[in-house]
């Protein structure tokens, strides 16, 4: 089966070409591979709205890897993201860091190390090859030698932790599933695969495309935003040319201005990073807002969003982009709430800053701390239901062995005194961590 490569600039109807072909192939169990889980959900909904509800699946690349593994019988256990972080933490503890000691103390070091390891694994660069490359880069420089040795040690110790557990991470899982498919290509069958929405393709993703199309004989379609000679798209030239050599059919779509409400946006897309003296009037397509403070800035943005909503623009079609949400998320959420605007913000918050977290921590104080702390924690538990409707109740899952108990606020103190006494009596025994324990707390 052929590899079809669909190329073209933004808004050149690539979506219609790829999604139309996917829709036609759904009854054959086609797979649409998209970059993120959010993309998968969005395209699933979009296709369902168009009536395409039978056959086919929309998956991420990791979902494709799992499908390949299932068909070829590869059953290695893959660690979760949390397990992966814990493995890296162990690897760092077993690595003597001197040159990197100060960097390793920073909060983002572990995340950066994991991203480096993932990139190395996606490119199938072994620990030995990586160490050799760093040694060649050092070229005898003492500081570089130490730096390279420590970086290589982190990668090596991480892989040893995986080997010790007898497990793999997501990248190794995909590579080995593809290796199994290369050994038994007939197990894939004739399922068509469509790749859409990717800005770039990693070596691992490119290997999957080649394996499916050239070795397994599957019908594979890949769409990339690319146009020869465009400065903004030049970084993708290597990937495009690599796939062009494998493709039986290359469809190059021309630029269109049909989908642009504002001519300035079309001009920006066509001239981005290009040397040109041509200018166009942006009109209302680009606006500059100036504010006297952070809150005022958010209020100006909220007012613009509110105006769009009143003009019947769907909320999910509006995006507010910040360089970082670390110090701004709470303010944005508060101001948008005051304006009556529904908002979805991706951010991490401390567990103790949530109503559930405060309730759980109060229960922990009841069970584990001294009598004086118990008295101060019980009011915190009772306050957790202050926003509930009158007559509402709490559901406390006291033990993994007992059914959930539904109690009202009038009996909460008595019940919790009983359980606190039992927890305190178990603190000196070896079974305190294996016996009764609080598991969850929710309002019903």
Image: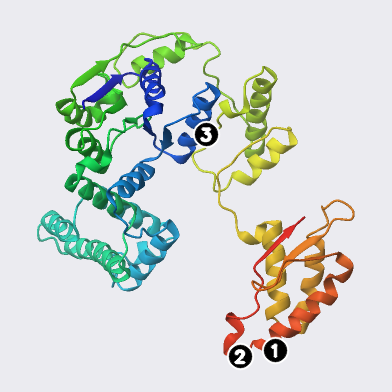
Which badge, 2 or 3, is on the more N-terminal residue?
A: 3
Callout 1–callout 3 Cβ contact below 8 Å: no
Question: To which quarter of the image does residue 207 belong?
Answer: top left
Which residue occupies the foreground of this view, 102 or 3?
Answer: 3
413 lies above or below 392:
below
Q: Secondary structure at mark 1?
A: helix
Name the front one of labels 2 and 3: 2
Mark 3 Cα within 10 Å, few/some/many (few <14, many 20+)?
few
87 lies above or below 374:
above
Callout 2–callout 3 Cβ contact below 8 Å: no
Q: Which residue is mark 1?
A: 425
Callout 2–callout 1 Cβ contact below 8 Å: yes
| Label number found at residue 429 | 2
Q: CA distance from mark 1 to mark 3?
A: 53 Å
User: Quadrant of the image for the C terminus?
Assistant: bottom right
- Image position, residue 76 (x, y; %): 31, 59
Name the front one of labels 1 and 3: 1
Q: Which residue is mark 3?
A: 321
């Amino acid at each position: 089966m052929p590899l079809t490569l669909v190329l073209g600039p933004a808004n050149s109807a690539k979506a219609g070409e790829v999604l139309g072909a996917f829709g036609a192939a759904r009854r054959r169990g086609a797979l649409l591979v998209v970059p993120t889980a959010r993309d998968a959900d969005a395209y699933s909904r979009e296709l369902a709205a168009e009536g395409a509800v039978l056959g086919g699946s929309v998956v991420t690349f990791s979902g494709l890897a799992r499908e390949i593994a299932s068909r070829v019988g590869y059953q290695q256990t893959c660690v979760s993201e949390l397990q992966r972080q814990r493995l890296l933490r162990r690897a760092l503890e077993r690595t003597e860091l001197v040159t990197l000691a100060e960097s390793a103390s920073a909060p983002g070091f572990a995340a950066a190390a994991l991203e480096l390891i993932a990139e190395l694994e996606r490119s199938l660069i072994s620990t030995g090859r990586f160490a050799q490359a760093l040694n060649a880069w050092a070229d005898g420089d003492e500081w570089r030698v130490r730096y390279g040795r420590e970086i290589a040690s982190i990668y090596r110790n991480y892989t040893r932790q995986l080997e010790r557990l007898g497990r793999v991470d997501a990248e190794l899982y995909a590579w080995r599933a593809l290796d199994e498919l290369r050994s038994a290509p007939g197990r894939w069958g004739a399922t068509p695969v469509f790749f859409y929405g990717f800005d770039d393709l990693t070596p691992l993703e490119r290997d999957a495309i080649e394996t499916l199309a050239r070795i397994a004989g599957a019908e594979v379609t890949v769409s990339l935003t690319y146009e020869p000679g465009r400065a903004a798209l030049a970084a993708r030239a290597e990937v495009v040319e690599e796939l062009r050599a494998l493709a039986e059919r290359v469809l190059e779509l021309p630029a269109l201005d049909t989908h642009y409400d504002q001519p300035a946006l079309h001009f920006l897309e066509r001239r981005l990073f290009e040397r040109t003296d041509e200018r166009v009037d942006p009109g209302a397509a680009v606006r500059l807002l100036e504010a006297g403070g952070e809150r005022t800035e958010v209020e100006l943005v909220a007012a613009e969003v509110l105006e769009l909503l009143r003009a019947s623009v769907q909320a999910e079609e509006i995006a507010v982009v910040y360089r970082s949400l670390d110090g701004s998320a709470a303010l944005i959420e508060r101001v948008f709430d005051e304006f009556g605007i529904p908002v979805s913000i991706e951010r991490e918050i401390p567990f103790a800053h949530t109503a559930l977290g405060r309730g759980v921590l109060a229960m922990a104080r009841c069970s584990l701390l001294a009598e004086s702390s118990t008295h101060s924690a019980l009011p915190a538990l009772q306050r957790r239901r202050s926003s509930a409707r009158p007559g509402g109740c709490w559901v406390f899952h006291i033990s993994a062995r007992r059914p959930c108990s539904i109690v009202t606020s009038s009996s909460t103190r008595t019940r919790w005194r009983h359980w606190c006494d039992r927890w305190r009596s178990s603190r000196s025994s070896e079974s305190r961590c294996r016996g009764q324990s609080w598991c969850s707390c929710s309002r019903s």
